[in-house]
């Protein structure tokens, strides 16, 4: 004899009373009518049959069916507040190994040692993402002092598990982690994962307290990802950051070398996995290291001897420009800084013009005078105005008496001058 109520569920999961007062229970449990409360996880549909069951206060044991597709993986676990629903067994060696396809789940309901009715659920959980897809609801009456234990209940331990921590975050590279497991000595467990990028590397025991270790593979995507390790019906969450977007920088933008043969190096900073290349834009600068790299690295180069004027050349490294300036072999070379039309003449300004310097117009020597006040910085091209049409562009150089030639300077005669 047990005092309480017998309750069943309709197909919408709502409860309704079918009997009240003191009733005699002659069976281990009372099933609700068959029904399917379906939920979707990707392409998988999950439901339980029946939707739930009600029990007298002295407990009991039974099973229910999980209905799903043949390729769908799932596990079961009681809700955290329902520790009185225990020894839940799905068709696998351990709770944490996923069942695949439709199958049957058995469970036990412990006696209710209070007079207060209670309710709990066994959740059907998608193995891939840890989401609850269906629930089997159990209602139980209170149990008076003279309430006998149901014969189907064996004295075995009620297994519950705790994992610490319950989650961990990782960087985008290869990393490892440890999960501590707390359980009774007689309670078995195993660590498993549905994610291919998480590997269970070791576990100290499959019974009682212990630990499990795992590793994560590199995340080659820029977005983070989340996975799970299953232990004792619990989900340990693994979060891995995505790799940083590729960005590149070089330690310096330029270098100066002497006229003699020389060498140098450029440090490249880049996230791991980010590829870059290097090339020379000057025939007299040769890259001596590898021209392709990944992540941070170093580019070395060799500069040929300079037997002419001071010169500039560039390297293209990881999308950045590195400038090499090399001194002249001996003395200074002329450099043009500006050109203007003055009356009939062409006025060329710059530096290091020597006595006898000549203006070249499109590589042809022209009549040249040195300014009496600034002979090393100003040259006058006699009557060169008429050789350049308005709007015409020409190349102008200065050649010193020792043969040293300035870099070409591009000049366009303004309209109206």
Image (cartoon, rainbow, N blue to C red):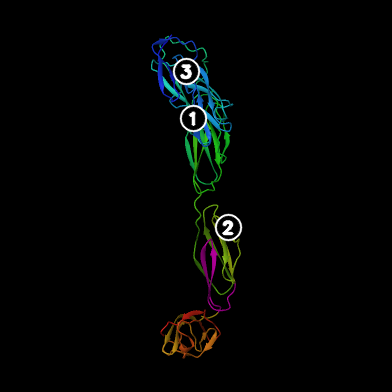
Rounded to the nearest angstrom, the CA distance separating label 2 from label 3 is 64 Å
Task: Tell me if I can see residue 232 in this picture.
Answer: no
Q: Which of marks 2 and 1 is nearer the N terminus?
A: 1
How busy is the neighbourhood of tag 3: few (under 14 within 10 Å), some, or many (20 plus)? Answer: many
Is residue 48 positioned above or below 44 on the image? above
How busy is the neighbourhood of tag 2: few (under 14 within 10 Å), some, or many (20 plus)? Answer: some
Residue at label 3?
Answer: 110
Whether the magenta-drawn stretch holds residue 314 is answered as: yes
Where does residue 413 sit, x and y in percent of width and height? 45, 82
Residue at label 1?
Answer: 38
Asked which secondary structure carries label 2, the reply is strand
Q: Give the range drawn in magenta.
A: 304-329
Residue at label 2?
Answer: 293
Whether the magenta-drawn stretch holds residue 381 is answered as: no
How busy is the neighbourhood of tag 1: few (under 14 within 10 Å), some, or many (20 plus)? Answer: some
Q: Earlier in the sequence, mark 1 or mark 3?
A: 1
């Amino acid at each position: 004899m047990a005092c309480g109520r017998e309750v069943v569920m309709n197909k919408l999961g709502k409860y309704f009373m079918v009997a009240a007062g003191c009733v005699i229970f002659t069976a281990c449990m009372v099933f609700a009518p068959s029904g399917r409360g379906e939920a979707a996880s990707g392409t998988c549909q999950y439901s339980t049959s029946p939707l739930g069951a009600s029990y007298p206060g002295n407990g009991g044991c039974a099973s229910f069916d999980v209905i799903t597709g043949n390729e769908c993986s799932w596990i079961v676990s009681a809700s955290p507040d329902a520790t009185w629903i225990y020894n839940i067994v799905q068709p696998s060696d351990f709770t944490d190994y996923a069942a695949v396809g439709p199958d049957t789940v058995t469970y036990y309901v412990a006696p209710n040692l209070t007079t207060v009715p209670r309710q709990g659920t066994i959740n059907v959980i998608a193995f891939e993402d840890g989401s609850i897809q269906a629930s089997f609801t159990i209602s139980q009456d209170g149990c008076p002092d003279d309430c006998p234990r149901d014969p189907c209940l064996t004295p075995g331990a009620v297994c519950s598990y705790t994992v610490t921590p319950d989650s961990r975050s990782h960087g985008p590279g290869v990393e490892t982690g440890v999960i501590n497991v707390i359980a009774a000595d007689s309670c078995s467990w195993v660590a498993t994962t549905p994610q291919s990028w998480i590997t269970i590397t070791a576990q100290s025991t499959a019974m009682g307290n212990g630990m499990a270790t795992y590793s994560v593979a590199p995340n080659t995507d820029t977005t983070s990802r989340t996975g799970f390790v299953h232990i004792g019906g619990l989900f340990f969450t693994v979060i891995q950051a995505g790799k940083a977007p590729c960005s590149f920088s070089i330690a310096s933008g330029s270098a100066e070398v002497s006229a003699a043969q020389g060498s140098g190096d450029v440090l490249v900073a880049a996230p791991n996995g980010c590829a870059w290349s290097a090339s020379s834009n000057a025939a007299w600068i040769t890259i001596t290291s590898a021209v392709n790299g990944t992540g941070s690295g170093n580019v070395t180069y060799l500069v040929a001897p300079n037997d002419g004027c001071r010169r500039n050349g560039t390297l293209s490294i990881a999308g950045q420009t590195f400038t090499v300036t090399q001194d002249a072999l001996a003395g200074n070379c002329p450099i043009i800084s500006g050109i203007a039309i003055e009356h009939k003449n062409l006025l060329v300004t710059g530096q290091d013009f020597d006595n006898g310097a000549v203006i070249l117009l499109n590589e042809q020597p022209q009549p040249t005078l040195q300014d009496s006040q600034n002979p090393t910085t100003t040259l006058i091209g006699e009557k060169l105005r008429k050789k350049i049409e308005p709007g015409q562009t020409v190349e102008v150089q200065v050649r010193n008496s020792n043969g040293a030639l300035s870099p070409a300077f591009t000049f366009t005669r303004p309209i109206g001058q």
